[in-house]
Image (cartoon, coloured by chain):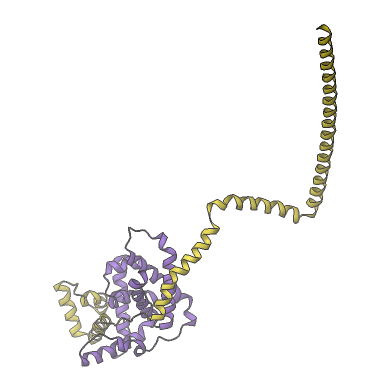
Chain colours: A yellow, B purple
Amino acid sequence: MNCRRLQDLLSAYLEGELGPAGVAECDAHLRTCPDCASLMSAAREIRRSLSGFPELEASPSLLLKLRGLPEKSKKARFRLDFLVKPSLQPVYAAATVLLVIISFYAFNAQNRRAVNKAVSRQFHIGCGRVEKLLARAEGITDGMGAYRDDLLDSLKSFQLLRKKGE
Amino acid sequence: MLVNSYSKKIFNMAYQFTGSYEQAEDATQEIFIKLFHSLRKFDFDRNFTAWLLTMTKNHLIDDYRRTRRERTQRDDYDEHYLCASPAENPENRLFREEERKKIWEKLDLLSPELRMTLILRDIQGRSYEEIAGIMSLPLGTVKSRVNRARLQLAGLLRPDQKGDKA
């Protein structure tokens, strides 16, 4: 047994984990080595002193703060829960698409001009189509009026013929 | 309920580790905030106390590394512990208090890992298996760390003050 070996076995010796042969070997070394004997004695005292180390009570102010934490946590979670509701997912998706479109429009001057031109052309085309549709609708209305007049005339003639026959 | 059951345990562990009452209170609050945020992730097949102590250990060691430069001295032992000492006979008590005071002052000279292992083993009286679970280390490594912590502290505290021979 040398000093290094005794230091390796210090805790096992203190905690009674060594067999009788190991204990006898350590005791023999401790009798002949004052350095190791002093180290062992200090380690034994440390262990005894630490085992009865006093425990402190947490201060009332700390306890008060700790008890308030779950409430704070719940409030924060409620706000977050509201924002991450699954029902809001389509709204976020639509908003993202809209923002992408706006960003393309707002941050690119060339595109903006092209978009303005395209929108204006489409608007005029749309107006032209509506005008054509209205004109066709008027034509159809006139046609329907003529048919109605013809029909009324035919009915009148038919009634006259019936009277003559009677 | 969590606050009532665990605040004292966490606060004492933080105070023993940091040596500062103010820092221990701050750390306890931060640990409870982390706890309330990660409760949903807790796997109920695991031991809750061990899980919480692992979280506490991680927080204390990380915080120690982060704030090393701002660190001040440990509080004076008598400031909080003198009135909280367990009942012992007066002669023994005087001797033990002197020993505890010396140990308290030297605890900061141990590395954070060794200090934490010693606190868990000798102050809190936990088994090596429990410590291995809390520190996420193999059993042999825990035993070796406890031995090294005792040796270093004994080297610092023995009457001739020669230091550890290893």
Residue A91 place in picture, x, y as percent: 61, 51
Number of numbered discs overlaid on the protein picture: 0
Give the camera-side residue of B159 and A97: A97
| Quadrant holding the N terminus of chain A | bottom left
Is residue B68 depicted above or below B78 in this figure? above
- Furthest-top residue in view? A165
For residue A129, side relative to residue B87 (left or right): right
**In this rendering, would A99 be left or right of B53?**
right
The quarter in which the C terminus of chain A is drawn is top right
Which residue is farthest front? A166
Q: Can residue B162 be seen in this view?
A: no
Q: Residue at x 36, y 67 (%)?
A: B52
Looking at the rendering, which quadrant does residue A29 occupy?
A: bottom left
Q: Position of residue A161 (x, y in %)?
A: 83, 10
**Residue A48 figure quarter:** bottom left
Q: Where is residue A84 in the image (x, y as percent from the top left)?
A: 54, 56
Depth check: give the residue in front, A156 or A39.
A156
> Eyeballing the image, is B160 above or below A124?
below
Tell me if I can see residue B3 in this picture. yes
Q: Residue at the spot x=46%, y=83% of the render?
A: B71
Q: Nearer the viewer, residue A11 or A144?
A: A144
* Above or below: residue A26 compared with residue A84: below
Task: Kindly identify the residue that appears in the image at 31 percent across and 63 percent down.
Answer: B47
Q: In which quarter of the image is residue B60?
A: bottom left
